[in-house]
Image: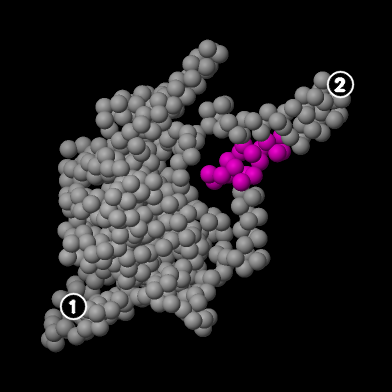
Amino acid sequence: MTPRIYRGLGRREHAGWIAGLTPGQALACIALAVPVIVALAAGNLAQALVLLAVSASVAALVVVPVRGRPALRWLAHLLLFQVGIAFGWSRWQAKAASGAPVDPGEPDLPGVLARLRFPDGPPLRDLGRVCLIHDTAEGRWGATARLTHGGVGMLSDGDCERLAHRLGNLLLAIGQREVVDRMTLLVRTVPDDGAEYAAWRAGHDAPGTPALARQVTTELDRVVGAVSVRHEVFVTLSGTEEALRRPASAAGGGIAGRAAALYRVLDGLEDKLRSLGARSVRWLSGAELAEAIRTGFNPATAAGLATYHHSETSRSAGAVSWAAAGPTHAPAPSGRAYHHDGFSTVSYSVLMPAAGTVFGSLGALLAVRTPGERRSLAIHYQVLPPRRARNLVRGHRFRSGVVRDWKTSKGFNSSAADSRDASGAHAQEKAVAAGHGLVRFAAATAVTVPSHWNIEDHAARLENDIAGRFQLLRMELAQDSSFVAAVLPVGIGLPRLRGGAL
């Protein structure tokens, strides 16, 4: 079976169609041109040339993109970044580390995480309480589950095709429910320096083993051990406050009512998650979610927490309190990396190729090259309501048709990109009209290493592993926020849709 190629995934939101400019950029260029035209009309050529030089420079700042952002926006972000460093807004120290009194149940988290609240909902069946994630800034409620999954690296093309089809059915099922509209799949490796395995080998070593057998075993450990890593898989589902308000009121209101409305959807989606190959689906309690956040900031704590869970104490108490879920110390982030609790992380946004991709092609981003390194990959989905999806694809088809017709009327030949865009817009509109859903998505990836390692070397290896298939856009000046999107299972990472086309 030939693998199916998924195309049209790299279309930008709010793509400009007025000579390639957004309406705001076009209006800015017109406003900058007015003084030049007025000076020329008055016959003042010298003044017009001076104004032209100034206007052209400002227009370049507004229009010319530099690594995904216009130059003027870069300047604004750089200014805010430096102001945050100067006033100490970017530095972080946990209250417990500073000696201040803390409430163990009160979250103490930095940056964008400070807007989150984590109330416990009522018990879900016999699984105990489920921790709700309340995003107070966007007005969203969600929950996170830990999945046990065997991965897709060893599956055949046919199996991958079936999983891709089931993922589409899962997203379509989410789109047909009014309560939940976003899903985040997060996979991150668990750093392993080999010490635990070496200790096990030393305790089970058989005396008198032939030298050749020892040599073969050592070689296998060197070759296989470097690529054999453990993975954590999380899924986060969330919905808006507006969508939850009515069913929550019918269920009694408050946190319990919102939890009841969410539970009905979560319960119905578990079978579809298992159809994707998940052997188990466990919705996280508050202590478990705090642990997942803590190990995200400090991977070194994973080994100690694993030992704790095998003790008798873990059966009656949580391993991590919310007051200790965040980093102990995080200095002001640099423009290209985020430093936290003795570790350094570089995060990227993954840009989809115009030529298309196949299911499972992002797996190379999780190929750990050095023991002790951690990699993570998060894909954020939002299923749009049918009415909004129809409006968006209709608008995109109209714009692509206008651009192509205008070029034809002026005697210009349509480029291959214009033809591909127009045909893709028509195909997408037909698919939505046939009942398929429209999904926004964003992918983020990150690499984390101990802070005394050279983080740039590991970032370069991550870029090399995916070179030629995907483009990685380093999230400069926003490494702390992109760390949350790429590493932590809280469902943050997809910006609001403010209108425009996909």
Residue occupied by mark 1: 214
Circle 2 Cα neighbour tier, 10 Å, few/some/many (<14 / 14–19 / ≥20): few
Name the residue type under label 2: Gly
Let me know if residue 61 is in the magenta part: yes
Do residues under tags 1 and 2 come within 8 Å of each other at their CB atoms? Answer: no
Q: Position of residue 96 (x, y in %)?
A: 48, 79
**Element type at mark 1:** helix
Start-end of magenta stretch = 56-73
Q: Which residue shows up at 42% across the image and 56% down it? A: 135
In the foreground, 94 or 215: 94
Instruction: Give the image location of residue 339, x and y in percent.
Output: 50, 68
Q: Nearer the viewer, residue 230 or 221?
A: 230
- Magenta span: helix, strand or loop, mainly? helix
Left or right placement of residue 47 versus residue 267 in this view: right
Secondary element under disc 2, as helix, strand or loop, is loop
| Crowding at mark 1 (Cα within 10 Å: few <14, some 14-19, many 20+) | few
Residue 362 in view: no
- Label 1 – label 2 distance at C-alpha: 91 Å
Residue under pointer 2: 43
Name the residue nearer the viewer: 290 or 349. 290
Residue 322: percent from left, percent from top: 39, 72
Say whether residue 387 is left or right of residue 15. Answer: left
Colour mode of the rendering: one colour
* 318 shown above or below 172: below
Residue 421: horizontal and vertical position, in percent?
A: 42, 27
As shown in the figure, which amino acid type bears the numbered disc 1? Arg
Relative to residue 99, is residue 325 depicted above or below?
Answer: above
Residue shown at the point (77%, 24%) measured from the top left? 37
